[in-house]
Image: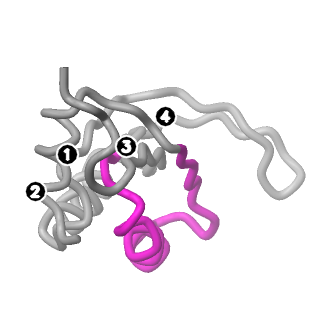
Amino acid sequence: MKKNAEGPNLILLLTSEKNEDNAQKLCLAILHSKLAACVSLNNIKSLYWWEGGLQDSCEVQITVKTNTINLGKLIALIKELHSYELPEILYWNISAEQDFKDWINKNIVN
């Protein structure tokens, strides 16, 4: 078994968009800029507080697989292109099987 310590650490970033069109545009911009190797989209229902009121909306949740080297640029791109005034941007370090980690790092700008 290969060691999982080679190359930059991986990051999983989560954001959401208000509809499929906006999510698709954001994901394509992320992928074309080579800041992520893969994005996944899921339709979700969100309930949240916004401007003093309880909101209920359908959204598209976007899961982005990237690495620590690209995190700052990825966040800047999301903030620039996102349709929300305050986009959800959550991220955490992840572990992965070495071949998958290598694939991610090979397919993004480092």
Instruction: Residue under label 4, please give it.
Output: 58
Give the residue at mark 1.
Answer: 38
Is residue 74 shown left or right of residue 91?
Answer: left
- Crowd rating for badge 1 (residues with CA inside 10 Å; few <14, some 14–19, many 20+): some
Q: Mark 2 against mark 3, which lies toward the viewer?
A: 2
The reply to whether callout 2 and callout 4 are in contact (CB within 8 Å) is no
Residue type, label 2: Asn
- Where disc 2 sits, the SS reads loop
Foreground: 74 or 25?
Answer: 74
Per the model, the C-alpha gap separating discs 2 and 4 is 31 Å
Magenta stretch bounds: 64-92
In this figure, which residue is indicated by the disc labeled 2? 107
| 9 over 101 or under it: above or below | below
Comparing labels 1 and 3, the label whose residue is closer to the camera = 1
Type of residue at label 1?
Answer: Cys
Q: What amino acid is at disc 4?
A: Cys
Q: Position of residue 29 (x, y in %)?
A: 21, 68
Callouts 1 and 3 close, C-beta under 8 Å: no
